[in-house]
Amino acid sequence: MSEADAGSARRHRVTHRTEYRYSDVVTSSYGRGFLTPRDSLRQRRVAHRLIIEPAPPTAPPARTPTGTSAPTST
């Protein structure tokens, strides 16, 4: 970050929605999402919320090699 940028802060709100529709009943699936923003020297995550509907049984979140949290569900 340059000295000129040091005092200028910006806030962004990012919303993403993914929806799946199937022609038949789905009884089993596996999902892995890389959806948690990482903090870095140039950005800081103020808040994060992940909503999955309908709520699936979940497994503990995994970590990618870069440190991103990867929630998993079955």
Image (cartoon, rainbow, N blue to C red):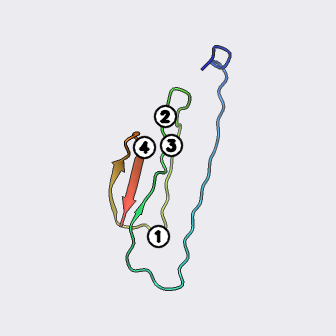
| Percent position of residue 59, x then y | 31, 59
Mark 4 and mark 1 in contact? Answer it, CB < 8 Å.
no
Identity of the residue drawn at 44% across and 80% down? 26
Which residue lies most toward the front here?
65
| Percent position of residue 70, x then y | 40, 51
Mark 3 and mark 2 in contact? Answer it, CB < 8 Å.
yes
What crowding class fits label 1: few (fewer than 14 Cα within 10 Å), some (14-19), or many (20 or more)?
A: few
For discs 4 and 1, the disc positioned in front in the rendered view: 4
Identity of the residue drawn at 50% across and 43% down? 37
* Label annotation for residue 68: 4
Mark 3 and mark 4 in contact? Answer it, CB < 8 Å.
no
Quarter of the image with the C terminus in it: bottom left
Q: Which residue is mark 1?
A: 54
Identify the secondary structure beneath mark 4: loop
Identify the secondary structure beneath mark 1: loop
Q: Earlier in the sequence, mark 3 or mark 1?
A: 3
Q: Which residue is mark 3?
A: 37
Mark 2 and mark 4 in contact? Answer it, CB < 8 Å.
no
Spatial CA distance of label 2 from label 1 is 29 Å
Amino acid identity at mark 2: Asp
Identity of the residue drawn at 43% across and 67% down? 55
Spatial CA distance of label 3 from label 4 is 7 Å
* Label annotation for residue 39: 2
| Percent position of residue 12, x then y | 65, 40
What crowding class fits label 2: few (fewer than 14 Cα within 10 Å), some (14-19), or many (20 or more)?
A: few
Identify the secondary structure beneath mark 3: loop
Of residue 12 and residue 21, the one placed in the foreground of this image is 21
Spatial CA distance of label 3 from label 1 is 23 Å
Q: Relative to 7, say whether 63 is above or below.
A: below
Quarter of the image with the N terminus in it: top right
